[in-house]
Image (spheres, helix red, strand yellow):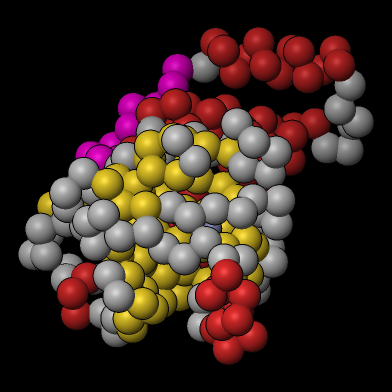
């Protein structure tokens, strides 16, 4: 794993920010959508939400010390974990995609009906939510197509929904979450013979870094 990039599963910092209500709407949707695929992330979220809830309800205003954190964690281990509800698993819809229910509530039953904009040959996006500095969009990359090489002005969170892509030797499949920041310069490519559909949340525009990209960057930075 390279500096600035986290792959495949949600990091604790992101889950903790969600559990404590610090995330903006697009990033909250990202966490909820990823968690629909990942039992591991759901289990960690339950722990973090429980810790947050207990801290707020019972420990305030006592400072959190090593001792009471340990007793808190022991108590959490004793509590039965709630079963994941039927809404936890991605479900098929009219458009044939199995999308996580939290995402489906935003994009409706047919993602083909969204306002898709072509970004380049074989790559299209449909933005459907924005707020508090974050943007949420679906990205569709046709089989075999690579998106332009780029870096990032802020953070980019990509969740694979259908198909797969390869980035710097790593393969990302449905449910996998990739984080990229200004230290990452990459060129993800759809693989596997089917289009790759992703949920992408960014908190700042991308920065194109390829030869052509550098020329286009001033013109495209408000679009990507
Ligand atoms: Zn990127």
Give me the residue at 82% from left, 17% from top: 68
Vertical arrangement, residue 73 with respect to residue 23, above or below: above
Q: Who is closer to the viewer here, 208 or 194?
A: 208
Say left or right for 138 vs 61: left
Q: Report the number of numbered marks.
A: 0
Vertical arrangement, residue 67 with respect to residue 207, above or below: above
Q: Which stretch did the figure color magenta?
A: 80-91
Whether residue 126 can be seen here? no
Say left or right for 37 vs 77: left
Locate residue 171, reporting x and y percent. 38, 37
Quadrant where ligand 1 appears: bottom right
How would you classify the magenta stretch by its main secondary structure? loop
Whether residue 2 can be seen here? yes
Say left or right for 189 vs 85: right
Q: Who is closer to the viewer here, 93 or 203?
A: 203
Give me the residue at 56% from left, 82% from top: 216
Give me the residue at 57% from left, 58% from top: 156
Locate residue 199, reporting x and y percent. 39, 59
Vertical arrangement, residue 157 with respect to residue 16, above or below: below
Res 49 → quadrant: top right
Whether residue 88 is in magenta: the answer is yes
């Amino acid at each position: 794993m390279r500096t600035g990039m986290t792959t495949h599963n949600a990091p604790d910092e992101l889950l903790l920010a969600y559990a404590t209500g610090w995330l903006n709407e697009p990033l909250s949707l990202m966490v909820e959508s990823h968690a629909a695929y990942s039992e591991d992330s759901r289990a960690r979220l339950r722990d973090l939400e429980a810790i947050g809830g207990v801290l707020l309800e019972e420990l305030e205003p006592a400072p959190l010390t090593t001792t009471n954190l340990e007793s808190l964690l022991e108590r959490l281990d004793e509590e039965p974990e709630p079963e994941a509800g039927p809404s936890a698993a991605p479900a098929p819809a009219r458009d044939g995609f199995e999308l996580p229910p939290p995402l489906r509530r935003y994009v409706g039953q047919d993602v083909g009906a969204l306002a898709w904009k072509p970004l380049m040959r074989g790559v299209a996006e449909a933005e459907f939510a924005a707020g508090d500095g974050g943007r949420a969009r679906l990205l569709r990359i046709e089989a075999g197509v690579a998106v332009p090489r780029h870096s990032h002005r802020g953070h980019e969170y990509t969740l694979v929904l259908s198909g797969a892509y390869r980035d710097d030797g790593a393969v990302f499949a449905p449910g996998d979450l990739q984080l990229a920041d200004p230290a990452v310069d990459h060129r993800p490519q759809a693989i596997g013979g089917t289009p790759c559909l992703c949920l992408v949340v960014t908190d700042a525009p991308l920065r194109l870094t390829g030869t052509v990209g550098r020329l286009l960057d001033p013109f495209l930075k408000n679009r990507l």
